[in-house]
Image: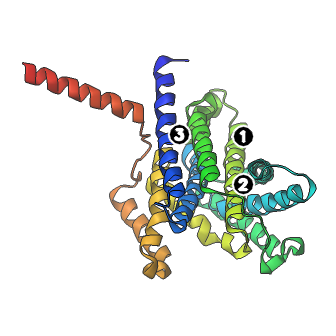
C-alpha cells in the first residue's frame, strides 16, 4: 500500500474514532441528552441514504427519485428478519441488527438491479419518472400487505439501533463508498457519466456497471432503512412517500453531485436545521425548493461540486503554510 494512502487511512480513522469517543463520553456522562442522541442517529441514517444515492445520482449521473422505496424494502425486510431471529435463536443484539440489515440490503439490491433495467434506454427526467413509479408501487404494496400491518403500519419492532452502532455502520458504509469511488469500478461508472458512447467504445461494459451502480446504491439504502426501522420501533408505509425521496435528492444536489463529502455535510445540515426551526416545519419542503433554486442559479455544481475534502491533505497544507511562514520570518 502506498505510504500516503496508509497515512490518510490512519488519520481519517483516528478522526472518526475521536468523534465517536466524544459522542460516547457525552452520552455516558449525561452531557448529551436523549434528544441530541436521536438527532445524531437520524443524521447517521440520512448520511447513509444521501451517500448511497450519490452512487447513482453523482457517480453515474442518473436522476433517481425513488430512493425512499428502496429504504422501505430494507426497513420492512430488516424488521421481519430481526423479529424472526430474536424469536428463533439467542444472539447478541448487534449481531441481529447486522444480519437483519444485510438481509434488507440484499433484497433492496435485487430490486434496485431490476429498477436499473429501464436506465438502459432512459435517461434524465424520463428515468426519474420511472424510479418514482417503482417507489410508489413499493409503498402501495406495503400499504396493502397484511403481514406487515398494511396501512396501520408495522409495530413491535425491537429498538436495536443505538448511537454507537449507527455511527460505526455509517462510518463503514461511507468508507466503502469512498473506496468504490476511487476503485476501477468507480472510475468506470464515472466514465459512463461523462460520455456513455465513448465508454462503450473503449471497451467498458456500460450495462454491467449501470446495474452495479444501482445495486450498490440500493444495498446501502436498504441498510439505512433497516437502521431506521430498528430505531423508530414502528413503520408507517406513508413515511416513504415521493416527498421523502425528494428530500434525499435535494441533499445530494446541495452537497454536490459526485461529492461524498458534500453529501455528508449537506445531510447533517438538513437533518439538524429542521430541529432548530421546528416552528417552521410545515414549510420545510418550501425551504428545500427555494434552496435548490438559489443553488441552481448561483452554484449549479452544489456546495462542494465534485471536490472531496481530505483531512490528511488539509493537514499537509497547514504544515506547508507554517513552513513557508517560518522561512519568510527567517528571511
Q: Which residue is mark 3?
A: 194
Residue 141 in the image: x percent, y percent?
A: 82, 71
Give the residue pinned by disc 2. Answer: 222
Q: Of callouts 2 and 3, which one flags the residue occurring earlier in the amino acid sequence?
A: 3
Q: Which of marks 2 and 1 precedes in the sequence?
A: 1
In the image, is 36 to the left or to the right of 183?
left
Q: CA distance from mark 1 to mark 3?
A: 15 Å
Q: Residue at x 35, y 61 (%)?
A: 297
SS state under label 1: helix
Q: Which residue is mark 1?
A: 207
- Looking at the rendered image, the quarter that the C terminus falls into is top left
Q: Nearer the viewer, residue 48 or 230?
A: 230
Give the farthest residue toward the right. 88
Asked if labels 2 and 1 touch by Cβ distance under 8 angstroms, the answer is no
Q: Residue furthest left?
A: 331
The percent position of residue 200, horizontal first and vertical second, equals 65, 33
Is 98 placed above or below 74 here?
A: above
> Which of the 4 image quadrants contains residue 213?
top right
- Name the residue: 55% across, 66% down: 34
User: Measured along the vertical axis of the image, is residue 46 above or below residue 315?
Assistant: below
- Residue 190 visible in image: yes
The answer to whether the residues at label 2 and label 3 have Cβ atoms under 8 Å apart is no
Q: Nearer the viewer, residue 191 or 71?
A: 71
Mark 1 nearby-residue class (10 Å; few <14, some 14–19, many ≥20): some
Position in image of residue 144 (x %, y %):
84, 76
Amino acid at each position: 500500500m502506498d505510504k500516503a494512502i496508509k497515512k490518510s487511512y490512519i488519520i481519517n480513522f483516528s478522526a472518526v474514532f475521536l468523534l465517536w469517543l466524544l459522542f460516547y463520553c457525552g452520552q455516558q456522562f449525561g452531557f448529551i441528552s436523549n434528544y441530541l442522541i436521536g438527532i445524531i442517529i437520524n443524521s447517521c441514517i440520512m448520511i447513509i441514504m444521501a451517500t448511497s444515492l450519490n452512487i447513482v445520482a453523482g457517480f453515474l449521473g442518473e436522476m433517481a427519485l425513488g430512493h425512499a422505496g428502496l429504504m422501505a424494502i430494507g426497513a420492512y425486510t430488516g424488521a421481519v428478519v430481526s423479529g424472526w431471529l430474536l424469536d428463533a435463536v439467542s444472539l447478541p443484539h448487534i449481531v441481529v441488527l447486522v444480519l437483519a440489515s444485510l438481509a434488507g440490503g440484499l433484497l433492496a439490491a435485487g430490486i434496485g438491479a431490476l429498477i436499473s433495467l429501464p436506465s438502459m434506454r432512459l435517461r434524465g427526467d424520463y428515468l426519474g419518472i420511472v424510479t418514482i413509479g417503482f417507489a410508489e408501487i413499493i409503498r402501495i404494496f406495503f400499504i396493502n400487505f397484511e403481514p406487515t400491518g398494511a396501512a396501520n403500519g408495522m409495530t413491535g419492532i425491537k429498538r436495536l439501533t443505538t448511537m454507537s452502532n449507527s455511527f460505526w455502520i455509517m462510518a463503514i458504509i461511507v468508507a466503502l463508498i469512498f473506496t468504490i469511488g476511487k476503485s476501477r469500478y468507480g472510475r468506470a461508472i464515472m466514465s459512463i457519466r461523462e460520455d456513455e458512447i465513448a465508454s462503450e467504445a473503449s471497451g467498458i461494459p456500460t450495462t454491467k456497471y449501470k446495474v452495479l451502480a444501482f445495486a450498490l446504491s440500493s444495498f446501502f439504502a436498504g441498510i439505512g432503512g433497516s437502521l431506521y426501522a430498528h430505531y423508530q420501533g414502528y413503520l408507517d408505509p406513508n413515511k416513504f412517500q415521493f416527498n421523502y425521496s425528494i428530500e434525499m435528492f435535494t441533499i445530494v444536489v446541495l452537497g454536490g453531485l459526485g461529492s461524498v463529502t458534500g453529501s455528508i455535510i449537506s445531510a447533517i445540515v438538513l437533518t439538524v436545521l429542521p430541529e432548530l426551526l421546528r416552528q417552521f416545519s410545515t414549510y420545510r419542503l418550501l425551504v428545500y425548493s427555494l434552496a435548490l433554486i438559489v443553488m441552481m442559479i448561483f452554484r449549479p455544481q452544489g456546495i462542494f461540486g465534485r471536490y472531496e475534502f481530505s483531512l490528511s491533505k488539509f493537514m499537509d497544507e497547514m504544515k506547508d503554510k507554517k513552513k513557508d511562514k517560518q522561512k519568510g520570518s527567517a528571511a
